[in-house]
Image (cartoon, rainbow, N blue to C red):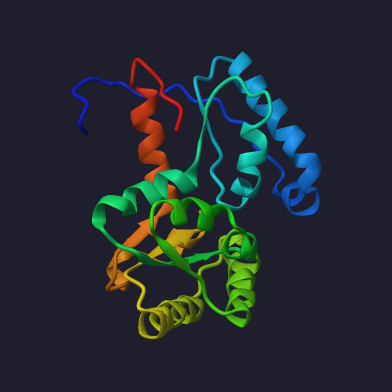
Amino acid sequence: KQFKNLASPEIIIHSLNFQEVIDQKYYIVSKIVDIINSLQYGGADFVIAACNSLHLIYDEVIQKKISIPWISIVNTTVDKIVPMNLHRIGLLGTSFTMQGKFYQKYARQQDIKLIVPPVKEQVVIDRIIYNELCRGIVKSKSRQILLSFINSLVINSDIEGIILGCTELPNILTQNLIDIPVFDTTQLHVEKAFRLSLEDEIVST
């Protein structure tokens, strides 16, 4: 709405088989490098990966010979939190994301402590994501379960906000259901990509 004309970004999409990400981490690094370089050859100025879990290999990929910036969903999300002066943030996502160090690493650099649910609850979150949300199934019972996990983090860990660290989670959880600030990684990432796509100069981030 901020643009008066009909400006819109040009988008090139490479759809990745997510099962390969789960099964073959080391193979997938080289594959992602090849994909990024092919997207650059096709005219892309930068890339985004619309998946939190895939950022498990972000550091490994950007150390390789990629020719355009990969805009991190992790950095984008944490950078949104920083000016709000919040320092204890809950993180929901797949077990890859909750147990991985990639969110924790960047958050720690910004003086933000990320807190995840207990492992037993992480198993339940995985089940809801993979067996329901990834298949387009949204159950009110599952929503209540996730809300109870967030409430437990508020009560027991004093979290000041919650990151929806899986692109499926906004389909079942929204800000109007939660009293603390909600950081929708999907929305934040899309907004960042949109702004960059309409800038004359792309800056790596």
Q: Which of the two residues, 197 or 86, is positioned nearer the viewer here?
A: 86
Image point (61%, 32%), residue name: 62
Number of numbered callouts drawn:
0
In the depicted structure, whether residue 11 falls above or below residue 152: above
Does residue 201 appear in the picture of this structure? Answer: yes
- Answer left or right for 166 relative to 120: left
Residue 20, placed above or below residue 9: below
For the point 69% across and 34% down, which residue is it? 32
| Of the pair 145 and 88, the residue shown nearer to us | 88
The image quarter containing residue 190 is top left
Residue 134 x %, y %: 60, 59
| Residue 197 point in image, percent of width and height | 39, 24
Where does the C terminus fall, quadrant-wise?
top left
Q: Can the viewer see residue 187?
A: no
The quarter of the picture where residue 87 lies is bottom left
Q: As displayed, is residue 22 above or below residue 13?
A: below
In the picture, the quarter occupied by the N terminus is: top left
As rendered, which of 136 and 96 lies closer to the eye?
96
Q: Residue at x 55, y 51 (%)?
A: 52
Q: Where is residue 151 in the image (x, y as percent from the top left)?
A: 38, 81
Q: Which residue is drawn at 58% across and 72% down?
A: 125
With 28 as the anchor, is 125 left or right in this view? left
Task: Classify 80 as above or below 2.
Answer: below
| Place of residue 55 in the rendered image (x, y in percent of width and height, measured from the top left) | 59, 46
**Nearer to the camera, 14 or 76:** 76
